[in-house]
Image (tube, rainbow, N blue to C red):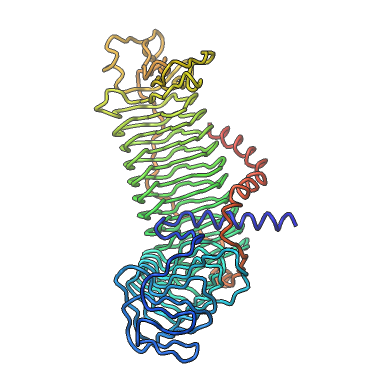
Amino acid sequence: MKGKALARVLTFVCLWLVSVRMPWSFVSANFIPEEPPPGIRIESDGTVKGTDKIIRTGDTYIFAGDIDTTIVVLRDSIVLDGSGYTLRGNGDSAGIFLQDRCDVTIKNLYIMNFTYGIKSVWGDLYTNEARRSSYIFGNNISGNTVGIYISSSTPHLVHDNLIVNNKYGVSLHSSKVVFRDNRFEDNEFSIYGNVYNDIDASNTVNGKHVYYWIDQHDRVVPSDAGLVVLYNCKNITVQNLTLTNNGQGILLCCTTETKIAGNVLTNNIDGIALFNSIDNFIYGNRIVNNSGYGIYLFSSSSNIISENRIIANRNDGVNFEGESVNNTVSENLIMENKGNGIFFRNIQGSIVIRNNITMNANSGIGFGFGPKGLIKENYISKNRIGIWLSNAEGNTITLNMIVDNDDWGIELEGSQKNNIIHHNNFINNAATRGLQARVAEIWSYPALGINVPPGQPLNQSEMPKLVPGAANVWDDGKEGNYWSDYKTRYHNASMVAGTKIWDMAYVINENNADNCPLMEPLEIFADLPQELPSPEPSQETESQQDSQKTETTGGLAISAIILVFVSFGLLLCLLKYRGNLIQADAKGLKQAQ
């Protein structure tokens, strides 16, 4: 019983986590019923208002010509038969709008040039869920912002549709949608939204099959995949695929011990996304020009991201959020991303080692609220900021080449403190500033005892003021960092006898100084990640792959109340794996150092 309860909560969490990644303009909370848009109306009494091009025969409504406006359906248990005619919009509103409707069939219709081709929403969260399904089949849905949008507690069957040349083919905020034999072609993003729906391999994306696996293990995704979604799976291999024009090229939710290797992921929203997924290996992929993140992880721990080429994505190259522990990012080429190269938020014990991180629009590596991380042996060049830490403490930054970054080589701000920074080369960063490192000032509130020196009494009369940022450690007691601008700042410095250390500290602020600055740059490493290695050959034969195309899928009913369970679900996930994660964290840091 406890296992079933945990599985249900994890499902709630994963559904919510995926849904919150949708662009805001396409998210409908559905707690307040929407006002139906203007247009033709099929009233609750069955009458048709606003056109003579829909002929009623009992509960069947048949098009008698093309229509150029929205159709609002206010009646259950009807059939809307397009008879091959076209429903065309002006780029806004919805083609067919259903709210709180069940047993509605939409078929044989061309639907084009709306914000939503078909929009089905449910405003009443508390009504009986034993409703009859609605059906969408045999339609051509093209040139819309969203082809089909479903955020409804009514079950839907979507089959035999051609969904083509939309920005989003379908946007799902429900868990009761069954997809069969649909063709998604030339959409900017084909399928996006909640994970727990029934979408089998009869559906295709640009001629390739959709593999939407639930509760599978020890399998290889076939080579004809166009979209891969894994929920509650274990030991799956996803390799040597080309995946484009999806919400996520590869999506893992509550999935473990899976290998993602040698794939090409381009023009998706996120190339690869992991939610509550542990012990996965992402290796040797080309992740290029996705409109969101190259790789996105939320509350996912002990994953390894290694030897990938992550280039020109329109947000961060790699982004970690949520409660995650002991992830490793190693030997990747991460360049020309429009956000950060790598960014961590609320992440503990992460390891970033031997990456080439260059020409990213924001920081090469960013840590926000991240303790106990290790940043080691990276080449960090030509980013806006080399390394950026905010409200982060206890991280170790060592043996990095930090070169030619535009703003700062390293910047620390907020309530950061006690970071250990030594044996790095800081070369030609922040050339116009005259200083390569910055520790930002912080606000002190003496009346409240916030950011005041230890032991200082409260002073009700003293006003808030800016004070120097807190202390970090910039040397190991014997050697510090190499600073290419050292002699420019300290003309009269000399060598400490018998060493290659300058005799004057490199001062950043009154709390932060490198007391043992190096006279010469360190030789850190010679080879930078450039080209990807060849992916590991598949261990499966073609016949074995073909035999694995039968899927087991299922549905688990949920309601929009899932938000209540999110925090509880995350806590249960963490508790379940806590012991293993802490051990892995300690082992991983020790090996890396």
Would you place residue 1 above or below residue 94 in this image? Answer: above
- Most extreme residue toward the left is 432
Tally of numbered discs: 0
> Is residue 569 found left or right of 134 in the rendered image?
right
Which is nearer the eye, 144 or 420?
Answer: 144
Which is nearer the eye, 416 or 578?
Answer: 416
Question: Which x, y percent locates residue 283?
Answer: 48, 51
Residue at figure coordinates x 48%, y 17% from the top left: 460
Would you place residue 297 above or below residue 458 in this image? Answer: below
Q: Please tell me in which quadrant of the rendered image residue 208 appears.
A: bottom left
Q: State the quadrant of the N terminus.
A: bottom right
- Most extreme residue toward the front is 45
Would you place residue 62 above or below residue 557 in this image? Answer: below
Residue at figure coordinates x 51%, y 42% from the top left: 328
> Is residue 213 found left or right of 204 in the rendered image?
right
Question: Which x, y percent locates residue 511?
Answer: 43, 17
Q: Please tell me in which quadrant of the rendered image residue 177 appears.
A: bottom right
Residue at figure coordinates x 43%, y 32% from the top left: 389
- Most extreme residue toward the bottom is 57
Which is nearer the eye, 496 or 15?
Answer: 15
Question: Which x, y percent locates residue 275?
Answer: 54, 52
Would you place residue 432 above or below residue 100 in this image? Answer: above
Which is nearer the eye, 581 or 476?
Answer: 581
Residue at figure coordinates x 42%, y 36% from the top left: 378
